[in-house]
Image (tube, coloured by chain):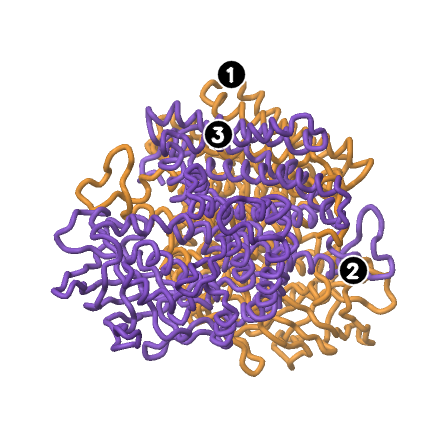
Chain colours: A orange, B purple
Amino acid sequence: MPSYTAPTRDLQFILHDVLNASQSDIPGYAEMDADFTSAVLEEAGKISSEVLAPLNTVGDTEGCVMENGVVRTPTGFKAAFDQVREGGWTALDLPEEFGGQNMPYLLGTAVGEMFSGSNQAFTMYQGLTHGAASAILVHGTDEQKAKYLPNMAACEWTGTMNLTEPHCGTDLGLMRTKAEPQRDGSYRISGQKIFISAGEHDMADNIIHLVLAKIPGGPEGIKGVSLFIVPKFMVNDDGSLGERNGVSCGKIEEKMGIHGNSTCVMNYDEATGYLLGEEHKGMRAMFTMMNEARIGVGMQGLAQAEAAYQNAVEYAKDRLQGRDVTGDKNPDGPADPLIVHPDIRRSLMDQKSFVEGGRAFLLWGSQMIDQSHRGGDEAAEGLVSLLTPVIKGFLTDEGYDMTVLAQQVYGGHGYIEEWGMSQFTRDARIAMIYEGANGVQALDLVGRKLAQDGGKHVMAFFDMIKTFLKENEGNEALKADFLDPLKEASKHLQAAGMYFMQNGMKNPNHALAGSYDFMHLFGHVCLGLMWARMAKAAHAALDDGTSDAQFYETKLATGRYYMKRRLPATALHLARIESGADPVMVLDADQF
Amino acid sequence: MPSYTAPTRDLQFILHDVLNASQSDIPGYAEMDADFTSAVLEEAGKISSEVLAPLNTVGDTEGCVMENGVVRTPTGFKAAFDQVREGGWTALDLPEEFGGQNMPYLLGTAVGEMFSGSNQAFTMYQGLTHGAASAILVHGTDEQKAKYLPNMAACEWTGTMNLTEPHCGTDLGLMRTKAEPQRDGSYRISGQKIFISAGEHDMADNIIHLVLAKIPGGPEGIKGVSLFIVPKFMVNDDGSLGERNGVSCGKIEEKMGIHGNSTCVMNYDEATGYLLGEEHKGMRAMFTMMNEARIGVGMQGLAQAEAAYQNAVEYAKDRLQGRDVTGDKNPDGPADPLIVHPDIRRSLMDQKSFVEGGRAFLLWGSQMIDQSHRGGDEAAEGLVSLLTPVIKGFLTDEGYDMTVLAQQVYGGHGYIEEWGMSQFTRDARIAMIYEGANGVQALDLVGRKLAQDGGKHVMAFFDMIKTFLKENEGNEALKADFLDPLKEASKHLQAAGMYFMQNGMKNPNHALAGSYDFMHLFGHVCLGLMWARMAKAAHAALDDGTSDAQFYETKLATGRYYMKRRLPATALHLARIESGADPVMVLDADQF
């Protein structure tokens, strides 16, 4: 069975050596000194390794089962959820007045990576509750906040998001679920929602569903969609639970992975709902949470890659097979460990350099969320909004590929469920799909974010790279290994943006046909930037005579690998982008 | 539920327009005219679509079940196996004297693609029998051939290959299974083998296991391994079945996919075995079949990609979601079909251009197997031996990636088992692992095949490309779209080979660290060559005033896509290769 070791050392490095968290003037960051974050991360790491990770295989094997409308979660999930609740881990970054701990989103992300990495299916119950609570926090009335948030922050009640219907996922304007206004100000909700994660289960006293629906007579399409709070059990004014509402789970889906999370078909049959935010502004209410939710999914991709990588390393060190061609490394044993073989190294280095670079990217993005929400920094808000589809799309695509590489290290054993490597792959697969399939992320990036506010944010990104390169000009330790490749890669990104500008006007398909490559090209440049910043921090620590030289030396070697062997992918993506729309669009539908 | 349509039109195009099969002087090819192969392919296609494809989901859902040592295959498998037997599909390319049809391996591969594409788990029972029968055909005594082959050719008895043990997969020198010689010339086989596909099941009267084991006192390591025939039921001299042999299935593995095929732990407890071939030459006996077996696995990767692609196309045409940015394509409907969106096109074109190019590559390789086996052509034998790891590794890696792309087209539905797209991905995953994990293929390519016979075969490959380019010099229809990109890509391949030659001597890790990239670089050049040859054939047909112009126009457009958008990957692979061993090997094992 796979194991999980919390990557606390690496998280601390990024938080403090790279992001200088406690030196930042973002409200709440001053408390985030190394001792404090270390204590939080160590504690969260312990729960991850000791409580959540051992349940990961259990969740996969048992799955969720529905009997007579009741959904049973896998053995041990309930007790573990209690432990997470008791430890106060359910609302790290929610306001204190509702029972949260008011910590930065940044720290929530760091803890979230460990929880997700050790058990993604389990952690989703909590993650969805957090998302729903955030929506109520931003768009709810004072009464709604008082009524729902304390129990949701504590995860005594969990939450869900109901968007998809059988005939519409991305194109929510096609939605059919109806909300009929009632005299008392409430609404009657009727319709069917699918793919509702944590839609029904046995780990909480109540479930607060957030449901998108159309009020009859409103605008057509997406402009006529509103958001509603639909509790599973009605909540009385004194906070006690009343009768069962008209919402029920029709079915649990059989999925490729995340079996421990119940994915439900939810039927709304004249259920009582309460408008959240304004009429017909449901999509706006959803969008305010979307950056966070998407960054959270990017985190899942990274987290599964980290977990799979850890186990691949252990296997590569343990499994004796073949001999090092340059000379036996284990002469007294029957064979050398797999890790002596260059192609196994190639695979492990691909994984390691992605995971560490991706983690820095993820935490940098999370810091910008804090800068924006806590610090009111509009530039940070614009930049993280631009980068969000990259964090989501790139980290989940690459994260998935890394779980496949990790599985491959196990040879035949990687295909056998007992060894657990298949689960990482199967669980990671969903992150490329939900919260906006990655093709939709690419469309969002190229079709919306790039030109947002007159292209200001992408310009700010390029300026930031230019400034970084300028600031470090003459730093010979960084130049050839980090700065030059970063410069080259960012030129490719600029050329791609230029191609879109020059050709997208004539025909938007010239931009959209290259959108997926652009998302990956952008992702590589971001990881290149992260590696350059990490290398700078590592050199600084070594120059300061750190007592942990091996950590920093390893960091530099891993970064050099990324710059040499992964970053050159930018040229390929540019070539594909510059081939334009014609090769992609030339066939008629019936020629496929 | 997914459907399967046999790609007979495309197979016919490759067999006749591209490979000119019936014009070839390979023994047996003269009969392969277009009418004949069409009849065979149509018939095989019918069985694939109507009998095997409908059982694919059944096999995945039910899996194989073991009760009291008896393994039950999924509902319907037994009846379908009877139909395949009755249709004479089990031994297309085996000699007539043993009940086969003596057709070329080429045609067997074309049929095999359809069988595998419609139901990989099912087709493996037959595929493994074919492999075992081929081994007996080449290495068996006349008596052994007479005793086993007729029933194996008819699949009345099925076969298995027993190589792997719990502690050794690739490194078979570590093997522990023992074969004690008996006075009557037989051997007593004892030991445990794992990952034995079709090791035990209820679809045949007998199972003929081919087992690698060590005769005590023989040479150490891989040089002391011999191959044995171990029947499940002893076979009497009159051909009737005798008592049960000392071999039994200990367990069926739970796998990520191919659930319809039983993957067994096989226990040999003083089982009676008969030497196949010479003592201590077991690996040589295995190797003679390895090219074919590996090409067969490459075929599986391609076949799953084709099946997944077909369903992705159907879904993209049916599912209405969003609008074409250049103007509504379905103005009377609520939305346009997915296929209008450029990023969906990008995905479908990636799939289509891979599948068609890969199919040509596969069949070209199969033709060389015939040239070698039937025609005694040593140059063809050398070339196909060089290309075999490329066919296996590249087609299965890319094939898997294509199933992931196809699954992604379905959005959320791609993750739900009911829709069947997850199964293509899960089934395709095994092909990257078994019959030598793809890293081992890369090692075989760079460590052995490249330098084989003084590098003669890779030189022949480059000469062939040079000749093709020269022959078509001045063909303006081909030049910019096909010949120039092929020339560029093949330069990258030569540069990579040169890098290995110049640096591999100093340190073999300079070659091995780039082996995986080299395998993919080689694969792209091969597909580039195939596309150039197919484009030439398409132009010829169009110039001849073909009545099927749309087919050939589509072919050209698909080829242009590959050359423009996929082939440029060669530059990235070269860059990675030329970065050498250092970035890959610099860390100590404990730095991971």
The amino acid at mark 2 is Gly
Find disc 2 in the rendering and name its residue: A173
Say which quadrant the N terminus of chain A sits in. Answer: bottom left
Q: Earlier along the polypeptide chain: callout 2 or callout 1?
A: 2
- Say few, some or many: other residues with alpha carbon within 10 Å of mark 1 (under 14 / 14 to 19 / 20 or more): few
Relative depth, front residue between B133 and A527: B133
Gap in angstroms between the C-alphas marked 2 and 1:
54 Å
Which residue appears farthest toward the top when viewing the image?
A474
Q: Chain of mark 1?
A: A
Occupied quadrant, residue A543:
top left
Marks 3 and 2 share the same chain: yes
Q: Which residue corresponds to mark 3? A: A564
The kind of secondary structure element at disc 3 is helix
Which residue type does callout 3 highlight? Lys
Point out the tag, 3 or 2, that comes first from the N-terminus: 2
Helix, strand or loop at mark 1: loop
Q: Residues within 10 Å of mark 3 (few under 14, many from 20)?
A: some
Please give the name of the residue rendered at 35% of the width and 63% of the height, measured from the top-left corner.
B160
User: Left or right: B326 with respect to A374?
Assistant: right
Amino acid at circle 1: Gly
Residue in front for this viewpoint, B378 or A515:
B378
Q: Are marks 3 and 2 in contact (CB under 8 Å)?
A: no
Looking at the image, tell me whether mark 1 or mark 3 is earlier in sequence order.
Answer: 1
